[in-house]
């Protein structure tokens, strides 16, 4: 498995990995599918802003993707980032997630970030466990802030301080 910078040519595959997650799960509260063009624009924007947009790939192709951007707008949050990691079903549990997250954290640290945030749907226990194993601490739960599939969902916030100081 290799971790590399996403290319615009990866956009259709990334969109295909993301589509069932958006359509069928509450992993994301966003109900709107992202087209290949949307993903290509996101790759350009994130990388243009100095943030990472990465893919994990094997000889069989792209297994998943990860990216980060500033947690909230404004200079006061310029050193706090929030990440997204999504894997194809066949890639889950095979080490792509930890490798992608480590690469994101290394990139963010190199770019001057201090904290990485994970915003996780409350019912996504697998993601909560994954982040805890990667050194993320639970810092809060926001009850019923997400809306999808005609119901409210809690949001769990976890964070990792990347550089002590």
Image (cartoon, helix red, strand yellow):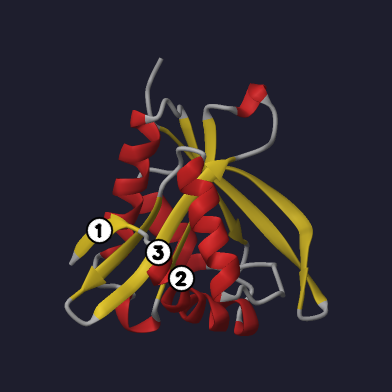
Q: Is residue 102 above or below residue 85?
A: above
Q: Quadrant of residue 29?
A: bottom right
Quadrant containing the C terminus is top left
Residue neighbourhood size for the residue with mark 2, other residues' Cα within 10 Å, grouped as few (<14), some (14–19), many (≥20): many
Above or below, 91 against 51 in this view is: below
Q: CA distance from mark 2 to mark 3?
A: 10 Å
Q: In the image, is 51 to the left or to the right of 146?
A: left
Question: Which of the image's four quarters has the N terminus?
Answer: bottom left
Q: CA distance from mark 3 to mark 1?
A: 9 Å
Q: Is residue 20 above or below residue 95?
A: below
Q: Quarter of the image holding residue 105?
A: top left
In the picture of the structure, the residue carrying the numbered disc 2 is 11
Image x and y of residue 146, in percent? 76, 63
Residue 137 visible from this viewpoint = no
| Closer to us: 104 or 125 | 104
Q: Earlier in the sequence, mark 2 or mark 3?
A: 2
Mark 3 and mark 1 lie on one chain; the one further toward the N terminus is: 1
Q: Residue under label 3, please give it.
A: 65
Does the CB distance between marks 1 and 2 fall below 8 Å?
no
Residue 153 showing in the rendered view:
yes
Seen at 25% across and 58% down, the residue is 3
Which residue sits at x=60%, y=67%? Answer: 38
Residue 42 in picture, x, y percent from top left: 55, 57
Residue 3: numbered disc: 1
Residue occupying image coordinates x 53% and y 38%: 81
- In this rendering, is residue 70 above or below 118? above
Q: Nearer the viewer, mark 2 or mark 3?
A: 2
Q: Is 81 situated left or right of 112 in this image?
A: right
Disc 2 element: helix
Q: Residue at x 46, y 77 (%)?
A: 12
Given residues 37 and 149, the one toward you in this image is 37
- How busy is the neighbourhood of tag 3: few (under 14 within 10 Å), some, or many (20 plus)? many
């Amino acid at each position: 498995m290799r971790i590399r910078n996403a290319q615009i040519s990866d956009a259709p595959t990334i969109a295909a990995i993301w589509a069932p997650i958006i359509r069928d799960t509450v992993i994301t509260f966003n109900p709107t599918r992202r087209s290949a063009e949307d993903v290509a624009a996101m790759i350009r924007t994130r990388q243009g802003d100095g943030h990472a947009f990465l893919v994990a790939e094997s000889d069989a192709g792209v297994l998943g993707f990860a990216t980060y951007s500033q947690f909230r707008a404004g200079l006061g949050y310029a050193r706090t980032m929030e990440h997204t990691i999504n894997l194809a079903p066949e890639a889950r549990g095979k080490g792509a997630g930890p490798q992608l997250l480590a690469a994101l954290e290394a990139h963010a640290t190199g770019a001057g970030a201090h904290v990485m945030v994970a915003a996780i749907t409350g019912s996504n226990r697998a993601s909560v466990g994954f982040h805890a194993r990667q050194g993320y601490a639970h810092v809060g739960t926001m009850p019923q802030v997400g809306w999808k599939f005609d119901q409210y969902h809690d949001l769990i916030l976890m964070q990792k301080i990347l550089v002590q100081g």
